[in-house]
Image (spheres, grey):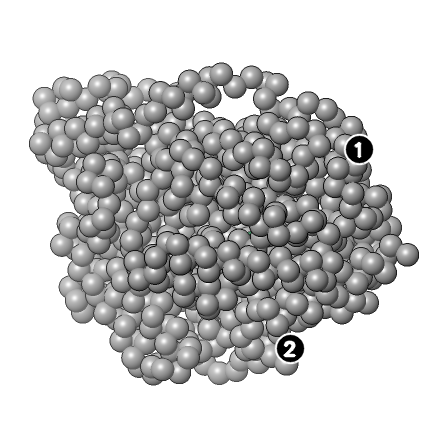
Amino acid sequence: MMKPKTTHDANDNLFEEADEMDGKLFTHNLGYPRIGEQRELKRATEAYWKGKISCDELESTGRTLRALNWAKQKAAGIDLIPCNDFSFYDQTLDLTCLVGNVPPRFRWEGEKVDLDTGFRIARGTDHHACGHGCSAQGGVFASEMTKWFDTNYHYIVPEFRADTEFRLSGTKIFDEFKEATALNINAKPVLIGPVTYLTLGKAQEDFDPYTLLDQLVVVYEEILRRLSALGAEWVQLDEPVWALDLSDAPLKALQAAYARLGKAGPKVIVATYFGPLRENLSHFLELPVAALHYDVVRGVEDLDRLLALFPTDKILSLGVVDGRNIWKNNFDASLSVLDKARRIVGVERLWIAPSCSLQHSPITLKNEPGLDPELKSWLAFADEKVAEIVALSNLKPETLEENRAALASRRKSSRIHDPKVKTRLAAVQNADLERSAPFAERRKLQHEKLKLPAFPTTTIGSFPQTAEVRAARAKWKRGEMQTTAYEAFIKYVIRECIEFQDSIGIDMPVHGEFERNDMVEYFGEQLSGFAFTENAWVQSYGSRYVKPPILFGDVSRPRPMTVRWSESAQTLTERPMKGMLTGPITILQWSFVRDDQPRSETARQIALAIRGEVIDLETAKIAAIQIDEPALREGLPLRHADWKYYLDWAVKAFRLCASGVRNDTQIHTHMCYSEFNDIIAAIAALDADVITIETSRSNMELLDAFVDFAYPNEIGPGVWDIHSPRIPSVEEMENLLSRAKALIPPENLWVNPDCGLKTRGWEEVKPALQNMVQAARNLRV
Ligand code: GLN
Ligand code: ZN
């Protein structure tokens, strides 16, 4: 393997080598956030859906946002600026519309797929609360939506059938390129590549979607030719599938597609991101295109091999600035990468970029006046990342010094490093990850203490967050309502909620989580080590954006967080209350996480903090405690080979937080999904006394994993699909329970909904839970 001539771990002599290092690197961007600094896109699309603004007005908001985004990147000094990275909903959906792949149930006919048809695919034609996946009564159901790789962005899943025919059916990509050119922007149209599109879609019948490749590539060729005619020099095709485990079929498809697309029109840059290439590397380098983009942040393990093998006829774009996180780039580390690459590839063939599209970053630090200045000096959102790319392309000594100073302050800051946390963690023993008795023994003690009937009924935690509850919280947060008044109000709704549960006979009631806005934010606000922003929104799907907390420092729990609520709620009922906590992996997964220590270490810190809360709840006589981990599965790495390592530390983090209690305290966990086949051993290793999961939509079929594995502990398969407004009947839930009873030992079975009830209304919750309790009772006789 060819070795770089020199390694520069320390870059002290960097500026002495001006001859060899001369010349500014070419900069480009892979994609820019589309939502607007003030969430203008959300406001406009939602107003359009409600009929409050016209299509022209919506389009005009889109144009304004694009113009602003391009202007900002141009002013920052980016040489080649993405276009068609804008979308009113989702770029995968845009591609579906562009190639005319409208699912037949929408009965689309005509030349051009218009905006409304796109929205219909995304939202269905009967907009009930769930919005996705379920069949809407009377309407046409939306296409499914799922997570884009391991991000929190969700795309609309393309649907394929053996008779799917593609044809060019839109002009968005051309229009936006023309629009950019008219504004004097050196624009590069961006499109998801054909193989990623086929790989991420779902076959609606038994056939191989790659058989559609040929005709799909024909449409891409046409698109590329037209872009070329419009004067596009470059086009970027995103193929993040390169970061997955690839079988022969997609590998062949990639080679076949780019053998044609590489010569169809403009010069093609193929972008991969989100992970290392490993065994896919040589295939990637063989793609017959003009340029290749590589994510160095996630793929650094392949960097030396990539540089050594990099073909002499292509441009290499290195993504050195992390598009997935909010931390300032380490210029010394990036320079060492770029320096190495420059020596091998040469300055003319080396481009610099973010690791992936910046759509996964918040837009600007400028609108965060409330953020602590020291913390702020360590951060970079999209605009700051754009500036970093430009800075790195031709680094000035003073800029490097500034960056070094910011990073040094972060390394040393006492806001981040809490020796007490480190000492406590160092004292953790293996025994702290184990309950003191095995499940069989614990269960006996728990049953004696809890005295629950067979098929005990419970819920997942939250009850309706009514407009009234939300309004009270908003007032309190704005300082218009006193804390005492707010808390008295919350206590009042908790009392009502418990009285209701008692009146219908729920065996293990909950307090209803009315005091919480969000299951991560609520805990983050009370733990040290977290910061919150005002405007750092990131698109999750469509017009739904999230504002993840920033987990910047060592995590500890200054004081109990939920105990007083659970304790006072318990005084209102004779029945055993279930305390409600969010687990360490979910808190980690739904935050922007520090990058200066392994995620596993951060998870351990959170786990230790939550462990304290679990123990305090037990001391306050709460006999059952639920630790929610809905994000456990989404943390799974993209490559199968990395799963074991992740699951190992994730399971340990859960066990650390759950194992500090006595044997007669019942630990519950909850996960809002149902695919457990491939991770069931890890789920069992959590050793929760009870797990509640989502199963109602699959008619209990998804219990398979628990049956095949002979899952040892207690389990509550959801019997009410809370994503739909439909109220299930007693009979329906009884049928589901009978099926479940035939599959898993009846003495292990709990009765509960699929997930929390916070998005439902009381008018649905009351009859549905009443029916659920009746179904459980019918089973007992
Ligand atoms: N306890 C939470 C609730 O009921 C769980 C939410 C979730 O699983 N996402 O809302
Ligand atoms: Zn859930």
**Element under label 1?**
helix
**Where is residue 557 shown, x and y percent of the image?**
43, 33
Where disc 2 sits, the SS reads loop
Q: How busy is the neighbourhood of tag 2: few (under 14 within 10 Å), some, or many (20 plus)? A: few
The amino acid type of the residue labelled 1 equals Lys
Is residue 145 shown to the viewer in this render?
A: no
Residue nearer the viewer, 258 or 44: 44
Disc 1 crowd, CA 10 A, few/some/many (<14, 14-19, 20+): few
Of residues 325 and 21, the one drawn nearer to the viewer in this rendering? 325
Query: Quick one: quadrant of the C terminus?
Result: bottom right
Q: Tell me the tag on residue 444.
A: 1
Quarter of the figure with the N terminus: top left
Q: Where in the figure is residue 458, as x and y percent of width and height?
A: 69, 52
Q: Quadrant of residue 380?
A: top left
Above/below status of 354 relative to 775: above
- The residue depicted at 57 percent of the width and 69 percent of the height is 761
Q: CA distance from mark 2 to mark 1?
A: 46 Å
Residue sitting nearer the eye, 3 or 16: 16
- Judge whether 266 appears above or below 716 on screen: below
Q: In the shown orientation, is residue 374 left or right of residue 112?
A: left
Residue shown at 41% from the left, 66% from the top: 471
The image quarter containing residue 286 is top left
In the rendered image, residue 184, in percent from the top left (x then y), is placed at: 15, 64
Q: In the drawing, does residue 624 fall left or right of residue 298?
A: right
User: Residue visible at 70% across and 29% down?
Assistant: 663
Q: Which residue is mark 2?
A: 137
